[in-house]
Amino acid sequence: MSTPSPTKTGMIDFRGVSKWFGTLNVLKDITLSVEPREVVVVCGPSGSGKSTLIRCINGLEAIKDGDLIVDGQRLGDPATNMTQLRTEIGFVFQSFNLYPHKTALENVTLAPIHVRKIARAEAEQAGRELLAKVGLADKVDAYPSQLSGGQQQRVAIARCLGMRPKIMLFDEPTSALDPEMISEVLDVMVAVAEEGMTMMVVTHEMGFARKVAQRVVFMDAGAIVESGTPEEFFSAPKTDRSRAFLSKILRH
Amino acid sequence: MIWQQLQSLAGSYPLAVRGLGMTVMLSLISLVLGTALGFGLGILRTGGNRLISSVIGAWVDLIRGTPFLVQIFLIFFILPEFGIELDAFTAGIIALTNLAACFICEIVAAGIRSVPTGQVEAALASGLSRWQRMRQVVLPQAMRIVLPPLVGQYVLLIKDSSVVSAIGLTDLTRVGWLVVQRVPNGLLVFFLVGVGYFIVCYPLIMLARRLERRMGAAHGEVQL
């Protein structure tokens, strides 16, 4: 892959990014640029660094070397207001991480009210619409413990959308779900992608990748091994490692 | 004989009320101050600044590892050496508040640590500030863990307040000492002193038990 010129900046721009956990080199010289409205699926064996990669984007993990520029702001730069930048980046977790003491609606409206300073009534109106959009109009007053995994993850997506982010990051959003609940979450993600959201999605859901991703990035041992359109990647993987990986996940 | 003693005791009634009032005042003031300080310390203890956290940790260990009576004497007799004149009431409040704050600090810190990291990450990811994360996400969940032992700590605090009689404050315990000089029946007098403390503490014990039961149920209900 060629290094993008410093003047051209994508929505998310990794330039030679490296990271260590102690002596373990979890990200090795990552260079990757995600354009606005682009949907990139990141896959690879467990421990390949794909979750770490997207967790760096909103600063849940700090990078060691290289530059990471998100929405025109360089992470780690003293001039970059990380809290401010995070409001532009939605993050969907594998384990949902809904606030258990708040209802679905309160989960969605918390950050808009306290961070965006939107009036409560307005935020609640928008929150109800978002919950309706993810198919949970009848669950606005339910607590997370009263919802199924698929429903919780849809609330989590609505919670991100409530901030009207420029970027959405998904960290294995369907891995913790029972099989019958995966499609209801993927459907919501497809709808978000089709509205033109810039997305990076760590997932092994190849159907989702084929449907909405412009690019699939395959990682192994902390490095980007291969990247291409879903069509190229699935029908003609170029490396032994990606072939071995695909044979494992497609067998199921 | 016993009849005379009871009559004499009845005469001490106003003193007993004063003593009970002193005990309740001391406990209440240091309970409120100690709770506020304890929460502050507990939040700082878990706040990520290692230096602050270990200084607080060391202080808490020091206070937990020395007898309360010694702490009271230190505050009451040592501080005047440095030119800080304290009346017994203020010294008692300071000592009790400090004691309560140290125990509450550890209770609050344990509660905060019990909140899964995923909760903090979710709050962080949605752009909530440090204080908003604490106020909106972490503390409400920590309270489930904090409340039952916190109320239990209040009971201990009320009982520990009896130690301030050693620096001359006329609390319930000291009233016992005063009365027993006139009514030479230690068993009876201190039985009544004990009843006085129990009357103040028992509602809190009941409250702690109720909270524990309620929180236990809520915990089962709210699964992460």
Image (cartoon, grey):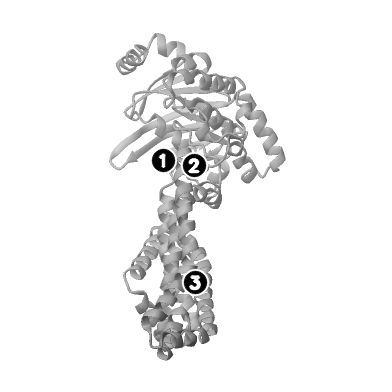
Label 3 resides on the chain identified as: B
Pointer 3: what residue? B27
Label 2 resides on the chain identified as: A
Mark 3 belongs to which amino acid?
Ser
Pointer 2: what residue? A75
Q: Confirm whether circles 2 and 1 share one chain.
A: yes
**Nearest to the observer: residue A219 or residue A121:** A121
The secondary structure type at the circle numbered 3 is: helix
The mark that comes first in sequence, 2 or 1, is 1
Q: Are marks 2 and 1 in contact (CB under 8 Å)?
A: yes
Count of numbered badges drawn on the protein = 3
The residues tagged by marks 2 and 1 sit, at their Cα atoms, a distance apart of: 9 Å
The residue sitting at 43% across, 91% down in the picture is B182
The residue sitting at 53% across, 67% down in the picture is B32
The residue sitting at 58% across, 26% down in the picture is A197
- In the image, taking residue B122 as reference, residue A134 lies left or right, namely right
Pointer 1: what residue? A63
Q: Is residue A8 visible?
A: no
Q: Is residue A171 visible?
A: yes
How would you rate the neighbour count of disc 1 (Cα within 10 Å): few for under 14, some for 14-19, many for 20 or more? many
Q: Provide residue B117's location: percent of width, then percent of height.
A: 43, 43
